[in-house]
Structure formats: C-alpha cells, structure tokens
Amino acid sequence: MHPAWLIDDIWRLLLEHLLPRDLAVLAQTCNALHDLATAALWHTVTDFKGLLQCLPKDYRHRSLQLEDLKRLDFYSAKIQVLSLEGESVSRPLRLPHPYQIHKNQKQYKENEGKAWDELWEEIARLRPQSAFLSNVKKVRINNADEQHICPLIGISGFRLEHVYIKYIHQRQSPSLVPKFLGTLQDITKLEYLFVRDGQDLIPSKILLEAPLKHIRFDPRISGGWHMNFHFKVFPIRPELLSKDTLQHLTISLTREWYTSQLKLGERKLFPNLKTLWLNLTTLESKAYSQHSPVEFLDALDQPELDLLNIKFRYDATGRQFLDVVKAAKRSCRLENLTELALAGGGWFENCMECGSRPAPSIQPVELREALKVVLPLPNLKVLRVSVAPNLLDILDLDLYEEIAKQMPLLERLHLGHAEFYTSSLFYGTVIYERVPLHHLAAFCHLFSEMEEVSVGTVDGKLLEEYPNKEWRCPNVKRVQWDWEGLYDIDGLNEAWMREGLSTYFPKSDMASALVERYLTELRVTAEDV
C-alpha cells in the first residue's frame, strides 16, 4: 500500500464524496476504515432515527441496562452537527416513529411502551448525560417539535460552539429551551446563539459566562388575517451589555426595549462589534418619543463595522430615519464598511395582504441626505436602500458624481425592491416605485466595479428612443427588477426598453434575455409567413 493511503486527511477528502449508504458499506470492510467511515457517516445527523436504532429492539418494553447504551454513546460521540429541521412551518419535523403518532403522551398505554420523555429520562439516570453527544459542535433546531430537545438536556456542551433554535412547534409548558441551555455543563466554547424569543428563554449564565461572538434576538409576531399584528415585547437584558467579546449582533428593539437597569450613559458598549443588524420594524413610530433607537446607538463604543443593516418600520418619519442614520455615523467607524443596508418593512395594522403595505412617508430627498451623511465609504461593495423608493427620481449628475467618488468600490446596488408595490382593494389605487432607466444608468456608469443592479420597477413611461451611450455600464452582469410594474402600462414601447438595456447594460443577463426573446419572436413570425 502506498504511504499516502495511511494519511487520514486524504481519506477524509475522499469520503466527502460518498453517499451515506456507501459509507455504511465501507465501514464494514476493515478496522482501518471503520473509524474514518463512521465518523463521516455520523458527522451530521438530521433526526433521531439512527440513534434509536442503536438501542435494543425491545427498548420501549423493558428496563434498560448500562450495557444497552454502549452503541448509543459510541456513535453519538461521532456527531458534530445536529441539524433537526422541518421542510417548512406547515411541515415541521416530528418525532421519529412510533412517537410521532401520539400528540398527547398521556395517551400511551402500558403495552405501547415508554413515552419519548420517559425514554430519555431513563437513559439519563443510567449514566452521566455528558456521555451523550460529547463532541457535538453545532445544534440547529428549526421547524421542529420542542420534544426534540429532550435528549439534549444535560449534555456536556464541551465542544458546543453554535446554537440555533427557531420556529418551535408543539411547545411544552414549561419550555424545554431554557432547561437545555441551563443544564449545559461547559459553555467555554459557545460563540453563536440564536433563540427565537430568546431574551426570556436564555439563562443569565449563558449571557454572562459564554464567550459569545454572535447573538441574534428576534421577537415573535402574533396575529392573522384581518387582525392587528403585534410583536412580543422584550426589554434588552442588562447581561447582554456586558459582552465585550461580541462581534456580530442582530437585535430587534420593541417599544419597551429600554429599562433603567441598562444604564446606557454609564459605559460604552460592544467595542469589538463587526456586524450590526438593527431591526426597528418592531418599534412603532410613536414609541420614538419615549426612548429612541438613537439612545442605543449613541451607547456604542465606536466599533469598526464591516456590515451595517438598519431596518425601519413602514411608518417611520423622515426625521426619525435621519436621526437614526446620524447616530449610527457618529457612534460607529464606517471606513471599512463593505455592506450597508437601509431597509424597510414591518407588519401594519389591518393587513389585508402581507405582500403589500402602505407607502412609506420617507421622501427621496431624505434618502439622499442620509446617504450623504454616512459618506465617505471607501470600502463599500454592497449598498441596499429599500427603506423608501425613488432614490434616483431626479437626474442630478453632480450629486451622482459626488456620491460615486466617495464609494469607489461599489459592486452591487439594490434600490427599493418590489415590496414597495402598494395596492388597495377598496379604493383601486396602485402605486409602484418607478426608476427612470436613464437615471439608473447615469448613476451606475460612474462605478467601474459595478456588477449587479436591482431596482423595484423601471418607469416604462420615461423610456428613451435614443439612449445616451456615454452612460454605458460594461461590467454589469446582472440586472433585476419587478416586471409587474412594466406591463400594466398602456403603450409601453418594448423596443425602446430593449434598446435601453442593450445600450446601458449590454453584458447583463436581462439585456441578453430580451434580445433573445425578440429574435425568437422574429423567427416564429418568419416561419409563419
């Protein structure tokens, strides 16, 4: 045998390309490959079916002994990623057969065997639970029944780095989430934490002792059709403010985010922060008068950000918008920022259809003022401005050049996505964002690195018969917008649209698609003749 075959890393690279059934067969060929093949086979587990098969066949109908758990602990120690995820909210991950057929575990009869929670409680009594999943590094639970957490209660967490829990179904009372997190025996490696509605489910021990670098807090939304939507209200946990290790923070501010325990004026926060996702869609416009998000931003200790994403509620005023942007500018260092998003969204009262919402009150002139506030951004590569439409509603070449000079490396531009389509079933009004194509080209041609452009809807009424070739953008490969706003316009000249795209964005996918469609139509017409 060549000496290279004795190197485990080479085998691991090869095993990455095998299917699970092939790994299972390979594990049975020889002792030399057994450990490597089983390690690859059990590296990522997506349900508990395989682990249950490590128990005796009659495990549900008799008392287990310590020796019955040897295979379970042996193979669970090889698991590094536990990913329990359903297909969608409507198709969550249920417990493995036969447990999934019983929604109420009190219905179990004596001849039906142990209930799910009874099984794992019995296993935990036979030996320290730290023997189970002793090497797991990542736990991800999404769209799954909460009882999937039962086997995790009491594990050591010695190597655990990542915990992600979202969209729990068939919730238990009391919740199993804080029990799982509170019984972790070792959290010295835990760096990533996301628990939906987690501010009241996460034990203080986790926030105080774990070396967390990435925290995400999102409140749950409640409501339904023809109802008022509302978010659960959470104050910010004081323990969170002590995390100087934090590098990535995603947080939503609700109307009761501020408490006197925070003492924001006494110390500066998060000096090592690299990315900040600040969700203000859960904060009503009227709540700004009590405690504005400006207070939170002003408490930051001048972190040097790579990414800044601020999402505003649909009813935010222009003044509130500008105040928040100015606070972010003076409280953070943005010289190395590579991605900036000033986004919009949020649910609104009496929502008839979630795909549309009232037009934002922020005006285009306020968008341009906010953009000038954050400049210069010498390293910015991605710019998203969707908090309100029509950033480029005026053709101001001097303004365009002023902006372009201060963010010369921009590669991707996203302006006012189609979510700004607003309709009314009762009053018959339809409002689209409409960006003049020549305005877009006049702006984009100033960026030599520009590769991708996305807008809500191009204004079909302002197309030009003779596009300005000086505004050609030769490096743009992808152009995207919502076509729905184009074809409801009477008299749209598709030839002008095709000519404009071919001139302004000649190498883009959309220009190629329009030309190809036009040529196909010509061929079909010729064949008919």
Image (cartoon, grey):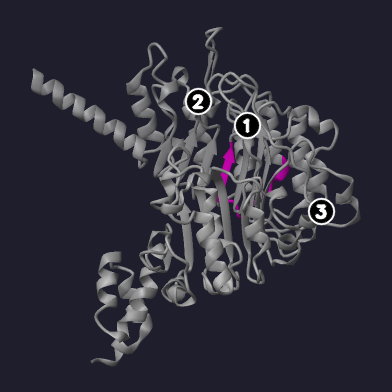
In 3D space, how far apart are the residues under numbered discs 3 and 1 (Cα atoms)?
A: 26 Å
Q: Nearer the viewer, residue 465 or 84?
A: 84
In 3D space, how far apart are the residues under numbered discs 1 and 2 (Cα atoms)?
A: 39 Å
Q: Is residue 375 above or below residue 79?
A: above
Q: Is residue 320 left or right of residue 58?
A: right
Q: What residue would you read off at disc 1?
A: 222
Residue 158 falls in which quadrant of the image?
bottom right
Q: Secondary structure at mark 2?
A: loop
Q: What residue would you read off at disc 2?
A: 436
In 3D space, how far apart are the residues under numbered discs 2 and 3 (Cα atoms)?
A: 48 Å
Marks 1/2 in contact by CB < 8 Å: the verdict is no
The amino acid marked with disc number 2 is Pro
- The quadrant of the rendering that contains the N terminus is bottom left
- The quadrant of the rendering that contains the C terminus is top left
Q: Nearer the viewer, mark 3 or mark 1?
A: 1
Q: Nearer the viewer, mark 2 or mark 3?
A: 3
Q: Is residue 243 left or right of residue 126?
A: right
Q: Is residue 493 above or below residue 406?
A: above
Q: Is residue 514 above or below residue 301?
A: above
For marks 3 and 1, the one nearer the N-term is 1
Q: Nearer the viewer, residue 478 or 37?
A: 37
Q: How many marks?
A: 3
Which residues lie in the magenta part? 373-385
Residue beneath the point at 64% across and 51% down? 216
Residue beneath the point at 70% across and 40% down? 372
